[in-house]
Amino acid sequence: MGQSVSSLSRFQSRSESRSRSLSEALFSESQSRSQSLRRRSGACSSSSMRGVPSSDRRDHTLELPDECLALIFSSLSPSDRKRCSLVCRRWLAVEGQSRHRLSLDARKDLLSFAPALLSRFDSVTKLALKCDRRSESIGDDALALISSRLPRLSRLKLRACRQLTDLGMSALAANCPDLRKLSCSSCAFGPKAVDAVLRACPLLEDLSLKRLRGLSDPTAASDLLLLLAPCSSSSLRSICLKELYNAQCFAPLIAGSPHLRSLKVLRCSGDWDLLLEEITSRVPSVADVHLEKLQVGDRGLFALSACADLEVLHLVKTPECTDAGLAAVADGCRRLRKLHLDGWRSNRIGDLGLSAVARGCPELQELVLIGINPTALSLGLLAGCCRTLERLALCGCETVGDAEIACLAARCLSLKKLCIKGCPLSDRGMEALARGCPNLVKVKLKRCRSVTPECVEWLKAVRGESFAISLDAAEQQEQDAVSASESGVQDTAAEQIPELIDQFAAVDLPSSSSSRSALSKSRMRHFMVSAFRRWSSGSGNPPSS
């Protein structure tokens, strides 16, 4: 028994030694193979690089001057410029020195970062300082520092910088005499700041003022009128006033700008008819006029008719303007190219005014009608007389249907883009577009419930691949669902109202034994029954809790 055990142990030791030697042999073989592969790859790489000259293995961008590198950076997008600035120190410096446009978060903390930031971007000429309306913005010290470090600033945009006062704006005007464009919105500085910029920046061409709180009180209005009365600017080309309470105080400045080309007055208070007469008599060369939500009527439009160079006119939600004023503009402004009319559903501009535009403005290229109801008569004249009409938008026009679209398709040969929104149009009108308007390339349909997707697909196939058409089907389905749900609610309510009336008539209101409480109980019951009857007949609104 002992001999058998000893022989078994010797057999196990021999087998273990054999397996150990076999594994060592395999490991040494694998190591030798890997070393040989590394030697071969190294030999191949060295042989491949042996024929390449050493001059081709260096960074050739080092041979480019900084000006060429900056020119390359100028053609990149902002995100690509940021990535390039992380490549090396040289690219970081060149990218910063060649950047001319910069937008910064104008919160209060910017003052501590401004010196280091402006030392890198010292060539900026177009700057935007925007602050969140719920945060505290930079003050006069920060604006004075920024303007002193960027003396070549030509464009500045300030938004929601409510901590800026007249002192900071005066420092800006003194440090940046080459300023050409200034846009300020939701700021709090007053009239002295505007006067300082106008006097210290003789090259200012574009001035945009929106929602300035410092011009709202009567004292500021009188100060502004006194400051701007003798003021004139020979360099101003564009003025935009939006949501200003005392915007009429800028009339002397507008009238004193002989080279003014663009005037936009949006949502400002006061009567503007007399001011437009004064402005157009002294600045007849204005070519672009936008009037939105103003108290202006035909008298103001008669004044605009004296501007023979007028090319763009926007009349948005000016309900006092009628066909007579539009006809006067069409008769005096024969170079009109773009006309936007938003009638605000006042029905005071219609076929008469549009027919006058067709006869008097043959160079019209773009026409937008919102809330105006033209017929085939005026649309046919526009299509026939305005041979260069390329863009047409019809929004909320209740009289524009299949016949009007067919008239446009037959006579509007130069039309390229057509937008129809909220008009009673069907598939029959869309079929007319398949045969007409040979230059039409884009059609946009929105809230046209009678136009089916099948007709849209058919029109795409007929017009070819170069034709694009879009139908807002999702919004249409949503509106249909809403209208269906509303009708269901109304039907259900109509069914339940008689039952509610009977229930209220039978309600026994709590009362005491006195005759006064019984009388009040009967009056209350009568009131509730009559109220629900009026609601059921549609003469009143349903009671709300």
Image (tube, rainbow, N blue to C red):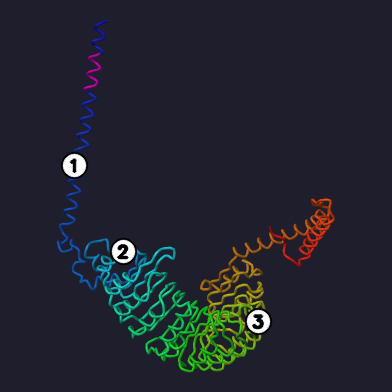
- Percent from the top left, x then y, of residue 471? 58, 68
Quadrant for residue 482, please give it.
bottom right
As drawn, is 274 to the left or to the right of 59?
Answer: right
Q: CA distance from mark 3 to mark 2?
A: 54 Å
Nearest the viewer among 190 and 350 is: 190
Overall secondary structure of the magenta section = helix
Magenta stretch in the rendered image = 9-17
Answer yes or no: do the residues labelled 2 and 1 have beta carbons within 8 Å?
no
- Mark 1 burial class by Cα count in 10 Å: few <14, some 14-19, many 20+: few
* Residue on which disc 1 sits: 35
Contact, mark 3 vs mark 1 (Cβ under 8 Å): no
Please say whether residue 24 is one of the residues in the magenta stretch: no
Callout 2 secondary element:
helix
Measured along the vertical axis of the image, is residue 506 above or below residue 199? above
At label 2, counting other C-alpha atoms closer than 10 Å, the crowd grade (few under 14, some 14-19, many 20 or more) is some
Judged from the image, the secondary structure of the residue bearing numbered disc 3 is loop
Amino acid at dot 2: Lys
User: Residue 406 versus residue 484: which sits nearer the camera?
Assistant: 484
* Vertical placement of residue 249 versus 94, above or below: below
Front of the two marks 2 and 1? 2
What residue sits 79% from the left and 61% below the top?
527
Residue extending farthest to the top is 1
| Image coords of residue 249 (percent x, y) | 47, 84
- Determine which of the numbered discs, if any, sits on residue 347 in the image: 3
> Which residue position holds label 2?
82
**Whole-Å distance between the Cαs marked 2 and 1?**
44 Å
